[in-house]
Image (cartoon, rainbow, N blue to C red):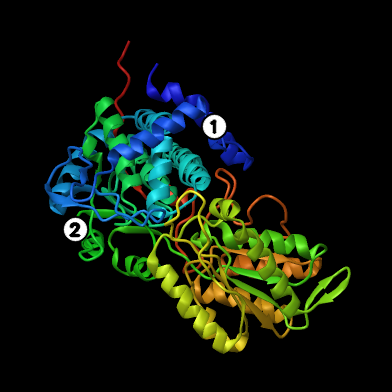
Amino acid sequence: MNAYQKHLPVLERARQACAERHCWSPYPEMPGKYPDAEQAQAAGLRAFEAHRGTEGRPERFAFDQPGQIGWLGQEVSPYTQRSLNIVYPQADLDALFDSAEAAIDRWAQVSIEARLGTLMEVLDVIYREHLFEITHAVMHTAGQSYNMAYAGSGVNALDRGIEALVYAEHAMRAVAPQARWERSFGSAQITLDKTYRLVPRGVAVCFTCASFPTWNAWPSMLASLATGNAVIVKPHPATVLPMAISVRVFRRVLAEAGFDPNLVTLAVDSVSDPIGKRLVKHPKTAIVDFTGSVQFGQWVEENAHPALAYTETAGSNTVVLESADDLDAALRSLATTLCMFSAQMCTSPQNIYLPRQGVRTPQGLVSAREVGERLAQAVAALGSEPKKAAMILAAIQSPQTLALLQELRAQGAQAGRVLLEPAPYPHPQFPDARTSTPLMLQLSTAQRALYAGERFGPVSFVIECDSAQDALAQATGDVREFGGLTAFLYSTDESFIAQAEQAYARAGAQLTINLTGAMPLNFAAAYSDYHVTGLNRAGNASLTHLAFVSGRFCIAQSRRPARQPASI
């Protein structure tokens, strides 16, 4: 049985899920449901610890890739605030591009099934042998909680990878490999045999972000590889380890399948000496996948040409609170989502708009002031219990985020009202963890300069508007001006809901309406939810639809007079 046949049952189920947009995954959603969970988790922890060196004696994360010129590494755990003491091979960029380009020809010439089978095997090996190792690596670089690192950066990222393969296969199989074409030209009958070849664009560069390194990277890598390209992975200097483990697996599986492992390589850099612009502008760069800051993402979009750029950055994700049947339930759901991973997610809500006269409920109007206070109380309750806070808030990835909170707190106290003061919470497992409860400010639209654009980290703004219509206009204005991936609406007025659906669709944000309960408002389900619309400044690429993969290959054809069948 070849690799494609081995993994075909999962691919077939994934195709069905993508077509029907229903809930499905081949992976267990919780760590405890993983096969032989206790042993697997212990082995994963040991594997993670084995990567780490000691002070003054960093451990080398070695794998054989071309052009090595040194060693680099500067990761610091947000949980211990100590160096991981790991260094990675620093490579000459021209050598990486040359080796990647040389690896493409044979990879591109094999069948679609051969590529898909090999890449499904990569995902299977990550799941079976490295999932908990990567879980700990994400925890101690990005700062996610253990459960989120397993679910969001582990199995859900694997799901998104399979999803990308489904769409890649769909796009490639839409092209007929050959055809016989006949037409009369005057008295002559012309018969041609035509061959259509799928030709990869070349070398893709995949940038990964600091807070969610695998979630966008795996589907981007798989989309490029499935369509015949090679990939150079450029991890954020703060979160190299999850991607180094991933690259090592890709290279190993490719080599075992008889392909050149240089189809996937790693390009590391440092904060003081970044290589991002050199990678984007390299003459052999054909595709750029970027996840990260708005500023560099916009630079990529403006400067990547002639390479194709697929970007996801961030934006001002908004909430409109117009009315609610159960205001407390709505506020609890908002509070959980505001706290999730300390709002270090591209889908975290930030700007909460409501009418100045208050929010309508069955019990009557609730003033804007009271709504802000009740929301702050719900958020404070989540941060008041260390065990709960550790699971929900987790850790702060960068010290810069704490500095931003203090700056915004001072500005907010002058411009409006501080609803909730940020403060460290004591992590029950890691006493030195970099933590903070959220900052919440109540403002009016006159203080727009303070909340305009993304403010990365656990900060939100309750903003009083002239009316519900003004609240919707302000919110969708944020999306159009600064970008926005997600949006949230609470209203009992069906006409207002219809108006908001249209307004947010035009602005290009994915809208969630009147959701309460256990599910985080910003949860994005693989095979069902589209992530990013590509309609505003938050990014031009969506996980996942055909446009995410179809541009990664082109079609070259040849044609010749048909060979007549032999005479009998």
User: Mark 1: which amino acid?
Assistant: Pro
| Tag 2 and tag 1, C-beta contact below 8 Å | no
Task: Single out the residue that lies furthest toward the top.
Answer: 568
| Type of amino acid at the residue the image marks with label 2 | Pro
Classify residue 374 as left or right of residue 55.
Answer: right
SS at mark 1?
A: loop
Q: How many marks?
A: 2
Residue under label 2, please give it: 283
Label 2 or label 1, whichever lies nearer to me, is 1
The one nearer the camera, 240 or 493, is 240
Q: Is residue 360 above or below residue 253?
A: below
Kindly identify which numbered label has been placed on residue 443: none
- The quarter of the displayed image where residue 274 is located: bottom left
Q: Which quarter of the image is occupied by the N terminus?
A: top left
Position of the C terminus, as image quadrant, is top left
The image position of residue 47, as x and y in percent, is 34, 35
Q: Position of residue 456 (x, y in %)?
A: 47, 68
Classify 123 as above or below 544.
Answer: above
Q: Earlier in the sequence, mark 2 or mark 1?
A: 1
SS for dot 2: loop
Q: Position of residue 46 (x, y in %)?
A: 36, 34
Horizontally, is 41 left or right of 226 in the view? Answer: right
Q: Residue at x 14, y 42 (%)?
A: 66
Q: Which mark is residue 26?
A: 1
Residue 181 in sight in this render: no
Q: Is 181 placed left or right of 101 in the picture?
A: right
Extreme-right residue of the structure: 363
- Nearer to the camera, 289 or 361: 361
Q: Residues within 10 Å of mark 1 (few under 14, many from 20)?
A: few
Q: Is residue 49 visible?
A: yes
Which one is in front, 155 or 254? Answer: 155
Q: CA distance from mark 2 to mark 1?
A: 40 Å
